[in-house]
Image (cartoon, coloured by chain):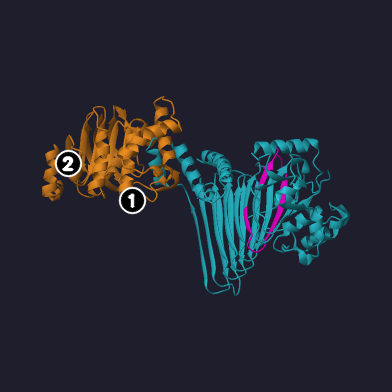
Chain colours: A cyan, B orange
Amino acid sequence: MTVTTLKQALAAPRAALPGSAASQDVRAAALAELGATGLPTPRREDWRYTDLKSLVDVELDFAPDRPDRAALDAAARALAEHGVPADAARLVFVDGHLAPELGTLGPTSGIEVRDLDDYWLQPETARRLRVSTAAHPLAALNTAYAQSGAWLRVAEGARIAGELRLVLVASGAPRRVAQPKIVVEIDRGAEITIVQHVVDAADTDGWLNVVTEVALAEDSRLSLYRLQEHRFRHAHTSLLAVELAARATASLGLFDLGGRLVRNDIDVKLREPGAALELYGLLLAGEGQHVDDHTRIDHIAPDTRSNEAFRGVIGRRGRGVFNGKVVVHRGAHGIDARQTSDNLLLSDQGEIDTKPELEIYSDDVKCSHGSTVGELDAEHLFYIRSRGVDEAHAREILTTAFATTVLERIAAPHVRASVADKVGARLRTLAEVSR
Amino acid sequence: MLKIENLHARIGSREILAGIDLEIPSGEVHAIMGPNGSGKSTLAQVLAGREDYEVTAGRIFLDGEDLLAMAPEQRARAGLFLGFQYPIEIPGVNNAYLLKAALNAQRQARNEQSIDAFEFMKLIKNKMELMQIPKDFLNRSVNQGFSGGEKKRNEVLQMLLLEPRLAVLDETDSGLDVDALKVVAAGVNSLRSPKRSMLLVTHYERLLELIVPDRVHVLAAGRIRRSGGPELARELDARGYDWVQAEAARP
């Protein structure tokens, strides 16, 4: 283990970068770009509410070792505790390293798994998706230091049964910065459901900086659920970048339950006509938690649709941020874009900043947005209490109900049931401590 | 069973109840009638413990216990039930869940065992049939998408399940057509018993032909102006409320 500060990591010589010789050019280039852009600070408009300073000056391990036996065992226990099915098609990343001991995809899975190096070694033009370093500096940090990753391809017309689980586990060793990168390419007419599950084996002060890129070809379909269950000392930054070709549809459900400092960037591009996006999420933040969801949807092509709905539940001394940007590009007519952000403050010692941002450079668009921030409804509370239910339980019932409308969007019934259980348990605690 | 003494209540600086005295013995059904704005609904809400109203004087006893010292849920557990005039919609809260939570909260308060899903279904089935409530109702959100009549039938269903000692029904008849009124009345009448009392708050006499009260009280300007038997309701129906209001206006 070698520890450095983030600033030292940015100035590291080429030789200090991890990974194969083949990936060094890509990594060094990313680091150089990041050096030029600089780390995001609250001086940037899109980072106004979220400050990374608690990660900048501390010593961290940017190149954690491959997990040893003890770390793998700890990870396996964490998976079992968090209800990740052992028999599921799953890939497990421990401290950022792909751990085949905990899951592999066989030839019958219909999913081809390749090393990330192969992805980097393609000519740049062959990569369907290129993340802008200027927009996402932490994605460049991920490229430079990614321990390993996976390049997944779903073949044309393939219908993948069940769900693919992508599990990101912190083994519990302190100060580790895990930076896996996952690229998913879904070919024409293919369909897949992915559950990205984030868990910690121990309550340590690590940092997960994950990048997930998904490219959907014509007529393909994706359902992706992300369940973030960090413990409360872990930092979490993520980029989920999705691009959709003609008539492709993506449904993305994001559930943030834990973490100390959480920043999620969700960046979706509707590139060709007929592409459709459903994006929804729950943001839960209690004492000591800062959770920031920044979403951006680009309607690049005409006749594309997006429907976005986020809900936040903020407990005592919790802090939430939601920023929803929708950009309708020039010439993109026939657009239907809806966005809502509804937030429940359980305590006057909680805070949420919610901001819709619409940029429209085209005519013939239907765009709507609405955001609300409120407390539990006094009439609802009285009605329930008048039936004999005590105040604490009534608050819990109403808090859970607020989140239920988001959970109901989850199409896969057993995923919905499992997410609902975990969300319910977290909300009970939030409602209880925020009275 | 219920004893109200010199009850005064206000909302903001406006006094709405100006000295109510009322006693309902066990097993009796009393009706409170009166013009709009007379304080009928305020009385019902104050009994249930709504915090928007400030009680400035007076006392209320339920079975000898000081009702005003109790939180709304404690009043319910002591046997009080309020049927709301405007039952609210609660999106995301499932009817079955709320009913079970309410029943079990009250059972626990009486040191009784909680009931499970199977027993609950057995208990609720006949009551739903009596109130003509469709089966899918249990899995729907509380009152969401219900018609006015369905909301009122749901209030009575809750009452049938919770079997209160004292039921206060606030204009449970308003907005109902004749058929729905009969269903509601059948539900209420099925619960009449020597151990239970009821207070019906209503504007119209037609409910009292189906649920015949033991006593009728006329409320105007925050005070009971007249009390009598069921014939008083018919008199009000024939004469209107103007004469009561005129009496109340006299110093």
Horizontal and vertical percent position of residue B18: 23, 42
User: Which of the pair B10/B170 is nearer the observer?
Assistant: B170
Q: Main secondary structure of the magenta part?
A: strand
Same subunit under labels 1 and 2? yes
Which residue matches tag 1?
B147
Q: Can you say which quadrant of the picture contains the N terminus of chain A? A: top right
Residue at 59% x, 54% y: name it. Answer: A321
Judge left or right: residue B135 versus residue B188: right
Residue B50 on the magenta segment: no
Residue B182 image-quadrant placement: top left
Chain ID, mark 1? B
Alpha-carbon span between mark 1 and mark 2: 24 Å
User: Which of the pair B115/B26 is nearer the observer?
Assistant: B115
Residue at 53% x, 60% y: name it. Answer: A339
Chain ID, mark 2? B
Horizontal and vertical percent position of residue A405: 50, 50
Residue at 83% x, 59% y: name it. Answer: A28
Q: Give the residue type at disc 1.
A: Ser
Q: Write the start and end of the magenta stretch as one range.
A: A197-223
Horizontal and vertical percent position of residue B9: 28, 42
User: Which of the pair A402/A38 is nearer the observer?
Assistant: A402
User: Would you say residue B39 is visible in this rendering?
Assistant: no
Q: Alpha-carbon neighbours of circle 1 within 10 Å: few (<14), some, or many (≥20)? A: few
Q: Give the residue type at disc 2.
A: Glu
Judge left or right: residue A246 versus residue B153: right
Residue A426 image-quadrant placement: top right
Which residue matches tag 2?
B209
Q: Alpha-carbon neighbours of circle 2 within 10 Å: few (<14), some, or many (≥20)? A: few
Q: How many marks?
A: 2
